[in-house]
Amino acid sequence: MTEKLSEAEIKEHIDPLLANGWTLVDGRQAIFKKFVFANFVEAFGFMTRAAIHAEKLNHHPEWSNVYKTVEVTLTTHDADGLSALDAQLGAKLDQLAGG
């Protein structure tokens, strides 16, 4: 089982993501970001690349895609909150999106 981050670990691992456009989700320990691309093909390509990394981490996002927008929520269900996996995947998604 993956361990939930402590408050100090959240500051260390999640705060850099918050500084890069992620937001905390109200009512649960999760982070959210909306990625907007030039068109559907770019958005779908991002999701495809992200899926490969998510599978390697065995950590899968909650996400949706409408045309050129991909909305992502990260949390670790078996930890009932944020874990190091969320920080890793969030940073990778930012990298894949070019930010």
Image: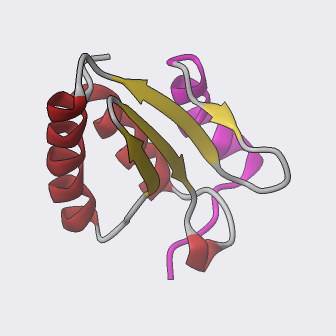
Where residue 34 appears, as percent x and y from the top left, is 50, 30
Where residue 67 appears, as percent x and y from the top left, is 33, 35
Q: Which of 37 and 74 is in front in this view?
A: 37
Q: In which quarter of the image is residue 46?
A: top left
Pick out the residue farthest to the bottom.
Answer: 1
Where residue 12 appears, as percent x and y from the top left, is 59, 34
Q: Which of 31 and 69 is in front in this view?
A: 69
Give the residues drawn in magenta, as a range: 1-20
Residue drawn 42% across the image and 40% down it: 90
Where residue 6 appears, as percent x and y from the top left, is 71, 54
Residue drawn 20% across the image and 54% down it: 53
Let me know if residue 72 is in the magenta part.
Answer: no
Q: Is residue 96 left or right of residue 68?
A: left
Pick out the residue farthest to the right.
Answer: 27
Q: In which quarter of the image is residue 40?
A: top left
Q: In this view, does 71 lie above or below 21?
A: below
